[in-house]
Image: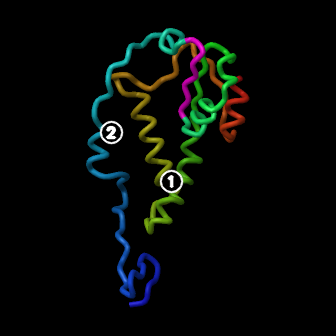
Amino acid sequence: MPPGRGSFRLRGQTSIAPRMPTGTIGTPALRAASSAPPRNSPSRPSRERVPSGKIVTQSPASRWSVISRRALRSAAPRLTSTAPHSRITKASQRASARLSRATKATCRFVEAALRRRDELDSTRADSPLVRADDAELVETDGATAEQVVDRLL
């Protein structure tokens, strides 16, 4: 059988690439770990939780940019960066990565799963992921990591 879509050739033999089941994301172990109850966190204002001069970011690229810039020491006392619409960009990236691994995940499927995860995280009874009352919202949709840091400074 010649190699085609969903197969590969290794040392002259054709093998069928494994397929991920549709309708699920992750392994059973990952789903079990992610469904564990969150640890309790005190619901203090962010001014008390985040030490002076510290910045909390959600995006790994933004975190790296923040860490690598020494100018942050002179920045505002407390900054928090979130990306509420990043799931749209992230869904496309994850779908592309999964498709390259011979899966049939679609951007809509991944985006729906991320939206569901965010909804569950923000509405759970124990330690919901919500913005603190005293947090200042800075829109960073579509910005690069460097642009995010520039907006925060």
Point 57% across, 46% down: residue: 88
Find residue 147 and report its horizontal and vertical position in percent.
72, 35
Question: Marks 2 and 1: CB-CB under 8 Å?
Answer: no
Q: Residue at x 50, y 11 (%)?
A: 45
What residue did someone put label 2 on? 34
Spatial CA span between label 2 and label 1: 18 Å
Q: Which mark is residue 53?
A: none
Apparent side of residue 62 relative to residue 32 in the rendered image (left or right): right
Q: Earlier in the sequence, mark 2 or mark 1?
A: 2
Camera-side residue: 81 or 132? 81
Picture coordinates of residue 40, whole percent (x, y) = 33, 20
Q: Above or below — where is 76 with respect to 107?
A: above
Q: Position of residue 72 (x, y in %)?
A: 66, 22
Tell me the magenta residue range: 52-58
Residue 66 on the magenta segment:
no
Q: Position of residue 73 (x, y in %)?
A: 65, 18
Label 1 Cα neighbours within 10 Å, binned few <14 / some 14-19 / many ≥20: some
Picture quarter containing residue 128? Answer: top left
* 66 over 107 or under it: above or below: above
Q: Quadrant of the N terminus?
A: bottom left
What residue is drawn where x is 55% and y is 47%? 90
Q: Which residue is mark 1?
A: 94
**Amino acid type, callout 2:** Ser
Q: Residues within 10 Å of mark 2 (few under 14, many from 20)?
A: few
**Helix, strand or loop for disc 2:** helix
- As drawn, 23 above or below 140: below
Amino acid beneath label 1: Arg
Helix, strand or loop at disc 1?
helix
